Amino acid sequence: MILVTGANGNLGSATLAALHARGATATGGSRTPGVGVRRLDFDDRVGMDLAGVSTLVLVSAGFAEDDQVIGRHAAVLETASRDGVRHVVYTSLTGAGDHLGFALAHRATERLVRTCGLPWTILRNGLYAELFGGLLMWAGDGVESAFGDGALAAVARADLAEAAAIVSADPARHDGSVYELTGAPITAADVAAGLAVRHRAIGLEEYRRRLLHEVPGLLPFQPPMLSSIATGVRHGFLDGTGTDLAGLLGRPVSDPLAAAVAAASAMRPGRVRTTAGSVPQATA
């Protein structure tokens, strides 16, 4: 049986749906399980149970500080080794993102995966197209961002979920592989054009000010994390593409621009309250 962690999250639920569509025997794990989902709380080391799981799809529990994330991942990997899991598939971060504010937790987890004693596969996911579109800020008759003219090799989340399903359905074929899963480069101006509105670039200082003072509910690690995405895109560090994703899918990757435009459109004033943009999770 395949178990996908974070089954209530966007990537986890999409991966589980893709597995079911392929006819795979799969279930989800979550700290708040619903019907047909196994309780799996990474903070409950004693209560974690992976008995009967052959392949574990470890979706990063990245919505926390690095020490918490790495500790949670270490706990679930220890449980996997104890309970006889035979393969671990980890959803990591593209190698081009090493400078991003949340990269360290991914690289530390990759090290844990490689040394846990189980066969493994690492999926280095590019940033979601949905995240890119969701981080644009509506202002008047247009959108603003700190991305400047920079491009992001964005990926539709559904493509990453399908890739994870393909790998976990036949893990032995992908043993010891590290895949770079990126899409086609798109810019904030491209998204604005898809919305038929104008794009105005703001500076990184102004963006950080808005995150710190105008977006309620952000956790302390989030403003620097989001600022690192903005400067990475703005200065051309996240625009590289590769062929691993299309190779895994056996087809061309989906158009990331369509997903980014849809996400930005959903943030339009009148549909969702937004100041500096509702902040989607970067890795879930």
Image (spheres, grey):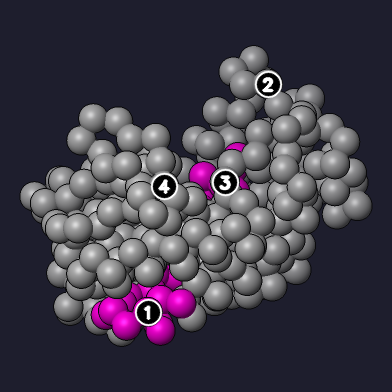
Three-letter amino acid code at the position of disc 3: Gln
| Residue shown at 42% from the left, 56% from the top | 45
Q: Which residue lies under the disc numbered 2?
A: 273
144 with respect to 87 (left or right) = right
For mark 3, does the 10 Å Cα neighbourhood hold few (<14), some (14 to 19), or many (20 or more) residues?
some
> Which element type, helix, strand or loop, lies under badge 2?
loop
- Vertical side of 164 occupied by 39: above or below: above
Label disc, if present, on residue 281 of the rendered structure: 3
- Is residue 52 something that shows in the picture? yes
Q: Secondary structure at mark 1?
A: loop
**Residue 251, image x and y in percent?**
25, 63
Determine the residue positioned at 16% across, 46% down: 20
**Residue 233 horizontal/vertical position (percent):** 69, 62
Q: Which residues are magenta?
A: 112-134
| Residue type, label 2 | Arg
Name which residue type carries label 4. Answer: Asp
Asked if the residue under mark 4 is in contact with the one under mark 3, i.e. CB atoms within 8 Å, the reply is no
Tell me the mark number nearer the camera, choosing from 2 and 3: 3
| Mark earlier in primary sequence (1, 2) | 1
Foreground: disc 2 or disc 4: 4
The residue carrying mark 4 is 41
Residue 116: give its label: 1
Q: Residue 117 magenta-drawn?
A: yes
Q: Nearer the viewer, mark 3 or mark 1?
A: 1
Please tell me how crowded label 1 is: few (under 14), some (14-19), or many (20+) other residues with Cα within 10 Å.
some
Q: CA distance from mark 3 to mark 4?
A: 19 Å
The residues bearing labels 3 and 1 have C-alpha atoms spaced at a distance of 27 Å
User: For residue 240: magenta?
Assistant: no
- Mark 2 or 3, nearer chain start: 2
